Image (cartoon, rainbow, N blue to C red):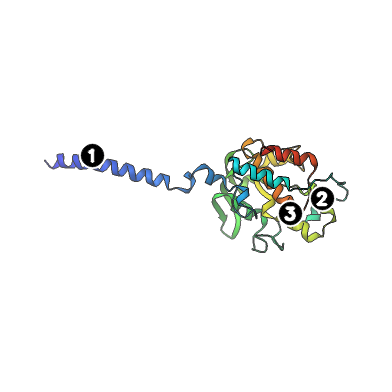
């Protein structure tokens, strides 16, 4: 009789145990909905402090993207003469005024990795240094497990490349403003290293992410940086940016 009662109790408990196990699985942050893992719609992230670059899919948001890009001014590029990366300050400096995350005692690269990564791990002796993470790369549409030993696998892309900025007007800026655009989180996206390398200093007319789903969001981010810093883009680049959002 005792054995029979035990068997009945086990049958009654089995659905409850199964439900508990499923509930635990769905509560994991790494099992969140794809949109949450991919980050934030750039239209809802005007200062670049929120993570990721979520594809823009709704007709309403795509129209808002076109409206924003329409405000961007155009100009033919000036000469590249005199351009040097040092003109934009030390790479990933924290010593920068007037932008989010400046002077927070962490280098810009680590700030941006921590912003966009999930399950982020830090070096014990240096709380800022990101040593491992999982990250969704918007340019390829793939999720990447990254460690510092594979540093070049994920690189930080300047959405508006610094050489492009120089040719579109940054050559006439003071050094402080150039340091700002080089370290502004609005202008920085962690992405696949080979994508970053293939982009170089190209504008949208010459290079777009291989992931077509993110191209409208990418064009919107370009527009946000252009408008914030009052930097024009080339006419061809503006036409391409508009096309990505259906304009």
Would residue 132 appear left or right of 67 to someone viewing this image? left
Residue indicated by mark 3: 182
The one nearer the camera, 183 or 247, is 247
Neighbours of disc 1 within 10 Å: few (<14), some (14-19), many (20+): few
The residue sitting at 48% across, 48% down in the picture is 29
Would residue 136 appear left or right of 244 to someone viewing this image? left
Q: Can residue 191 be seen in this view?
A: no
The residue sitting at 84% across, 45% down in the picture is 77
Would residue 51 appear left or right of 232 to someone viewing this image? left
Disc 2 from disc 1: Cα separation = 71 Å
Check whether the beta carbons of the residues at disc 2 and disc 1 lie within 8 A of each other.
Answer: no
Q: What element carries label 2?
A: helix
Q: Nearer the viewer, mark 2 or mark 1?
A: 2
Which mark is drawn over residue 11? Answer: 1
The one nearer the camera, 129 or 173, is 173
Residue 63: image x %, image y %?
64, 42
Q: Earlier in the sequence, mark 3 or mark 1?
A: 1
From what the image shows, is residue 58 above or below residue 162?
A: above
Q: What element carries label 1?
A: helix
Disc 3 from disc 2: Cα separation = 11 Å
Image quarter of residue 175 = bottom right
Residue indicated by mark 2: 166
The one nearer the camera, 39 or 122, is 39
């Amino acid at each position: 009789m005792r054995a029979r009662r035990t068997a009945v109790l086990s049958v009654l408990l089995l659905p409850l145990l199964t439900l508990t196990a499923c509930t635990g699985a769905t509560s994991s942050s790494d099992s969140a909905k794809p949109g949450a893992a991919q980050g934030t719609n750039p239209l809802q992230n005007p200062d670049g402090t929120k993570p990721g670059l979520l594809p823009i899919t709704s007709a309403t948001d795509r129209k808002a993207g076109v409206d924003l890009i329409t405000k961007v001014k155009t100009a033919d590029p000036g000469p590249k003469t005199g351009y040097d990366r040092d003109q934009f300050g030390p790479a990933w400096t924290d010593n920068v005024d007037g932008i989010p995350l400046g002077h927070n005692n962490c280098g810009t690269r680590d700030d941006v990795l921590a912003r966009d990564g999930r399950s982020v791990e830090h070096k014990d002796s240096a709380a800022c240094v990101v040593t491992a993470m999982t990250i969704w790369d918007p340019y390829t549409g793939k999720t990447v497990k990254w460690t510092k030993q594979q540093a070049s696998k994920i690189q930080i892309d300047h959405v508006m490349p610094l050489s492009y900025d120089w040719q579109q007007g940054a050559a006439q800026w003071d050094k402080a403003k150039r340091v700002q655009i080089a370290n502004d989180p609005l202008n920085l996206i962690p992405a696949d290293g080979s994508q970053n390398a293939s982009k170089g200093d190209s504008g949208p007319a010459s290079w777009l992410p291989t992931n077509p789903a993110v191209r409208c969001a990418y064009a919107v981010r370009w527009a946000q940086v252009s408008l914030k810093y009052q930097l024009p883009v080339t006419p061809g680049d503006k036409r391409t940016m508009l096309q990505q959002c259906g304009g």
